[in-house]
Amino acid sequence: MLDNLALGFATATTASNLLYCFVGTFLGTFIGVLPGLGPLAAVAMLLPVSFYLPPETALVMLAGVYYGAEYGGSIASILLNIPGTPSSSITCIDGYPMARQGRAGVALLITALASFFGGIFGILVIAGLAPVLAEFALLLQPADYFAVMLLGLVAASVVSNSGTMRGVMMVCLGVLLGTIGVDVNSGVTRFTGGVQDLRDGVGLVVVAMGLFGVSEAMMSARGATPSYATEKVSWRRFLPETDEWLRTLAPALRGSLVGSFFGTLPGTGQTVASSIGYALEKRISKNRAQFGKGAIEGIVVPESANNAAAQTAFIPTLTLGIPGSTTMALMIGALMIHGVTPGPRLITEHPDLFWGLIVSFLFGNLFLLVLNIPLIGIWVKLLQIPHYFLYPVVVVLISIGVYSIDHSILDVWTMLAFGLLGYVLRLYRFEPAPLLIGFILGPMMEEYLRRAMLLSRGDPMVFFERPGSAILIGISAVLLVLTALPRRKRKVTPNEEATETP
Amino acid sequence: MELRRMKENAGTLLLLAISLVFVTGALTFLELGTPRRMGPGAFPLIVGLILLCLCVITLLKDLRLPASYTPADWRSVGAVAAAVALFALLTPAFGVLPAAGGCAFAASFAVGDLSPVRRLALVAGAILGVWLIFFVGLKLPLEAFKGF
């Protein structure tokens, strides 16, 4: 294990690799902060540059870009409530309220630290368990994967602040919207209304920018520039209070554990990991009443889970060739351009590359910390831009960001439609985060459901006969029941308030 | 259902309508297949039915008590929607930079009253910012101007 890590360190710490990692992290963060441009866009933009570099250097730089953009997305989530990736939509739930309470600096600092913690944890897990985990992932069958997706969706609906019922409804809506486009199994187009350009489905970024970006602009544009933004920014304001440091340690560990486990499952490790981590924490944390209102644990858990999963996701990505996300798919593409094909033998045949990549992610994370802690002050200043200037600019940036993906005007119109949908739903206390997660997991869930049913010759009992899926479905059911029941009382409260106020 | 009740539950009603579109769409246009070989319509039908049931339950529950909702701020919605629409309309005709200006101009009406000078500064600033970030910095292959 140590030999492997040492080899990785030797690869990652050459001067030029470190330099490219730094440049990558720097550029990634700036691109990631722009609404509409996330890790995918950042990696895609800088991929051509990497062709001219040796394979390790290229990957090290892309790892930096990836981390930087992920963190940039978290900055936009926390400050503006515009998440760049589905997993950072979970960070929004507590990060944005924190920013509104004038604690944006604390949130950004904790995000960077939690990411780092999760990343290191994931690296240790990989270093120790890579061969075992690779075999474990091979043991799972479609029925088990279906159950994993189900658990992910249930967790996503439980994170919702407006009650599990509304969360489940949003997840269902997201899953339905995810079915738009060509059905991969039969080649039949579904729900496109005859529009040719919808055959490939609606783009993830289009949905995310509409639901979060456009509807957020509609919601908040009119609010006055908040008073906290004009307060003087000093170092002390970035530091959490002493008891908060202690309170974040256990959640960071739990988040990393959840993340490391779910990251090894091919598919959407990161999204599932951060929503399950958050849902779990919301059940067991002593501070659970604060969740959704700016609890520091609410950022620590999804961020550490997300980054631990990003690390362990390399196991399926590189050994099975199944990317965990589109960004990972691009990274595989970069590998293949350099003549390295992912496969079960990658770890043994190209140990320098595998371990170099793992360690370079560690450095990407470290640079992120070094680079961004001094910059937090600048990011927080973003909030000092007067609202009347900020929101129009955000609308312009989102529009161009979405347009630039495919040069498609239809995408801009679709984003507007999702913006209006998101706005109406928010007026009625339906939250967009579970919708987005349903939208991502839905298509995969359908795929595994159909495959499992085919393998079992149409017998739905397969989901309960396999121990793995039976346990996961059991957990999902318990989670649903547990969260749906005690909320009854709380659900009446807003209704009662309504009777008093009018 | 009286109008006030309709308004209070419009969100759920919207979801109900969407679920109905998916359920009827799956039933009329798509093959459902067999349990062993599920057709393209089976999964949307199942999920659509779940959403439909949940909408009905929520409606039954919320109709008994007056439900709370935030009233819409039509000025912000209209201005932001117009801004995005203007961007979509202007880009194919005039290119990205003029569209960005139009977008910023329309969006500036969402934030309340601005003096003409500030509005102008905002539009100019947005165009300059977009040019610097997307064309100078990121060098995206977008058309800055078209048809001039």
Image (tube, coloured by chain):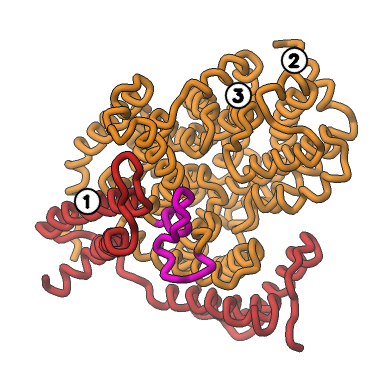
Chain colours: A orange, B red
Instruction: Say if residue A187 shows up in the picture.
Output: yes
Helix, strand or loop at mark 2: helix
Label 2 CA crowd tier, 10 Å (few <14, some 14–19, many 20+): some
- Say which quarter of the image contains residue A68: top right
- In the figure, A55 relative to B148: above or below? above
Q: Do tag 1 and tag 2 residues touch (Cβ < 8 Å)?
A: no
Mark 2 = which residue?
A: A4
- Say which quarter of the image contains residue A24: top right
Between the residue at mark 1 and the residue at mark 2, the CA separation in whole angstroms equals 52 Å
Q: Do tag 3 and tag 2 residues touch (Cβ < 8 Å)?
A: no
**Range of the magenta residues?**
A177-198
Badge 2: chain ID:
A
Three-letter code for the amino acid on which mark 1 is drawn? Leu
Badge 1: chain ID:
B
- In the figure, A350 relative to A407: above or below? above
The image's mark for residue B54 is: 1
Which of the two residues, A297 or B13, is positioned nearer the viewer here?
B13
Q: Residue furthest bottom?
A: B148
Helix, strand or loop at mark 1: helix
Which of the two residues, B146 or B103, is positioned nearer the viewer here?
B146
In the rendered image, residue A191, in percent from the top left (x then y), is placed at 39, 63
- Say which quarter of the image contains residue A53: top right
Helix, strand or loop at mark 3: helix
Mark 3 = which residue?
A: A122
In the rendered image, residue A388, in percent from the top left (x then y), is placed at 55, 71
